[in-house]
Image (cartoon, helix red, strand yellow):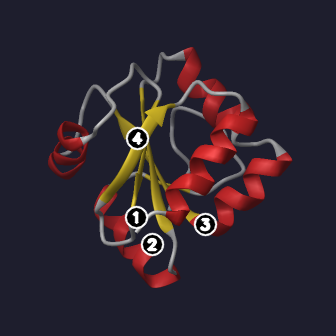
Amino acid sequence: MAHHPWFTSALDWHVGLDDAIAAAGASGRWLMLVFGRATCAGTRALIERTLAKEELEEFTREKFALVAVDADALEPRAREVFEALPVKAPTPLIAYLTADGRTLMSTAGGRPPAVLLNDMLNATTRK
């Protein structure tokens, strides 16, 4: 895990999907991929403000291995995930995956905290 060069965050972020899949499998967590851009104000707001809200931060830390994905330079595995997503919104885009990398759902990332929390709860109840 590392701190991503684009942003500051109290959460731990993986910079590679394979590393995050291994961590999620070892810890029994789901994966949350945030497809974003360094210059995207929405990506920064999602990561630095929305996910930092108390009601989201603890749940996010407990339930998800987080991956920051550069939408302008997708690694091959992240490109496969992106191309298979049912919803492809502008950045930030969030994809929720099982620990083994199977896509559960995707949503736009620019959502109010309560809606985002509902999305996370929905993702963690899917099989």
Q: Is residue 108 left or right of residue 86?
A: right
Secondary structure of residue under mark 4: strand
Q: CA distance from mark 4 to mark 1?
A: 17 Å
Q: At which x and y percent is residue 120?
A: 59, 51
Q: Is residue 75 left or right of residue 18?
A: left
Mark found first going from the N terminus, 4 or 3? 3
Q: Which residue is mark 1?
A: 20
- Residue neighbourhood size for the residue with mark 2, other residues' Cα within 10 Å, grouped as few (<14), some (14–19), many (≥20): many
Q: Which residue is mark 2?
A: 24
User: Depth check: 8 or 28 in front?
Assistant: 28
Q: Do residues under tags 1 and 2 come within 8 Å of each other at their CB atoms?
A: yes
Q: Amino acid at mark 2?
A: Ala
Q: Amino acid at mark 4?
A: Ser
Q: CA distance from mark 2 to mark 4?
A: 18 Å
Q: CA distance from mark 1 to mark 3?
A: 13 Å
User: Depth check: 7 or 108 in front?
Assistant: 108
- Residue neighbourhood size for the residue with mark 3, other residues' Cα within 10 Å, grouped as few (<14), some (14–19), many (≥20): some
Mark found first going from the N terminus, 1 or 3? 1
Mark found first going from the N terminus, 2 or 4? 2
**Quadrant where the image shows the C terminus:** bottom left
